[in-house]
Image: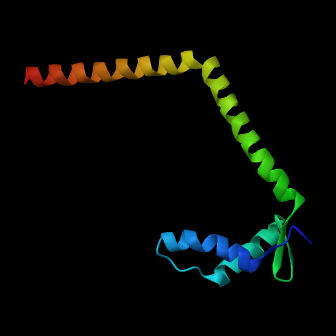
């Protein structure tokens, strides 16, 4: 199959990252993590090679879309409820200034 990625190629791709951090690449741990991705359905394994599954390809395409959607929802929520946040900030400032005034007056009276 033409889309197969051999384990040796995966290790060769990841090895420079570990070398940059002055760490050793543990191939047994890498194999364990790849097997975990197989168990989750993001990879399929055939012998010493791995293939991306349809699930992994769909996830890689929609993850950025979901992130953008979440940002848009947050901005929309903030724009609808900005007055609530402004009210909370105003109340906090009022409480803090009252406390400072009470403390200052009690210090001056002593």
| Vertical relation: 75 (above or below) 3 | above
Q: Residue at 22% x, 21% y: name it.
A: 102
Quadrant (top left, top right, bottom left, bottom right) of the N terminus: bottom right
Work out whether residue 104 or residue 10 is closer to the camera in this orientation and state it.
10
Residue 24 in the figure: left or right of residue 110? right
- Quadrant of the rendered image containing residue 31: bottom right
Q: Residue at 16% x, 19% y: name it.
A: 105
Total numbered labels: 0
Q: Residue furthest left?
A: 110
x and y percent of residue 42 in the render? 81, 64
Q: Identify the coloring.
A: rainbow
Residue 75 in the figure: left or right of residue 88? right
- Quadrant of the rendered image containing residue 64: top right
x and y percent of residue 46 in the render? 88, 79
x and y percent of residue 109 in the render? 9, 20
Residue 33 in the figure: left or right of residue 58? left
Q: Residue at 77% x, 69% y: name it.
A: 37
x and y percent of residue 40 in the render? 81, 66
């Amino acid at each position: 199959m033409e889309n197969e990625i051999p384990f040796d190629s995966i290790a060769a791709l990841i090895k420079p990252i570990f070398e940059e951090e002055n760490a050793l690449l543990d191939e047994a741990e890498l194999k364990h993590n790849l097997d975990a991705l197989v168990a989750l359905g993001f990879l399929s394994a055939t012998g010493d090679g791995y293939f991306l599954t349809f699930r992994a390809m769909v996830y890689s395409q929609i993850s950025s879309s979901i992130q953008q959607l979440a940002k848009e929802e947050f901005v929309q929520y903030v724009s609808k409820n900005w007055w609530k946040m402004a009210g909370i900030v105003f109340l906090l400032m009022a409480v803090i200034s009252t406390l400072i005034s009470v403390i200052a007056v009690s210090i001056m009276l002593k």
